[in-house]
Image (cartoon, helix red, strand yellow):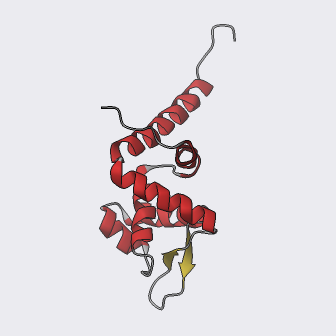
Amino acid sequence: MNRPPIPEELRRFILTSVPSVPFLEALLLLRATADQRWSGTMLAGRLYIAERTAQGLLDELCRAGMAAPCPSPDEHCYCYAPASGTLRERIDGLAELYARHLVDVTNLIHSSLDRKAQQFADAFRLRKDA
């Protein structure tokens, strides 16, 4: 039985806005706990990644307009805060899709990374005619 393909709108969103699976996992964790403040230390503990990596993900989410700094007396923290209603709807759709088609979504993210790596490698390939 064939699975339905990823809807084109979400496919474009994933390819243009989700650079990695850890980014997606961080995004979906913040979304699921929208009333919680997240530090790099907390995110690292939940995703089993290095604190530096977690802090980088939080910074990326902010640059993407998916999270924002939150005031906190203890640490520099972030909250789920999509920059627009449209972005919030896309993230909601992605969360639903990921829950049902985890493998398809991760394969799409990895295929995008593979293409970028190949393009980078091709840029340095020596050509016979050069």
In the displayed structure, would residue 18 be above or below residue 35? above
Residue in front for this viewpoint, 69 or 27: 27
Within the image, what quadrant is residue 39 found in? bottom left
In the visual, does 30 lie left or right of 44?
Answer: right
Q: Quadrant of the N terminus?
A: top left
Identified at 39% across, 70% down, the residue is 32
* Residue 41, above or below 92: below
Q: Residue at the spot x=41%, y=45% of the render?
A: 105
Query: Which quarter of the rendering shows the C terminus?
Result: top right
Q: Where is residue 45 in the image (x, y as percent from the top left)?
A: 31, 69
Question: Where's residue 126, x and y in %?
Answer: 60, 17
Where residue 123 sits in the image (x, y, percent)? Answer: 62, 27
Q: Compared with residue 103, is residue 61 higher up or lower down, i.e. above or below? A: below
Given residues 53 and 18, the one toward you in this image is 18
Residue 93 seen: yes
Residue at (36, 37) in percent of width and height = 3
The residue sitting at the front extreme is 1
Q: Where's residue 108, x and y in %?
A: 45, 39
In the foreground, 126 or 7: 7
Q: In the image, what residue occupies the spot 34% across and 43% down? A: 103
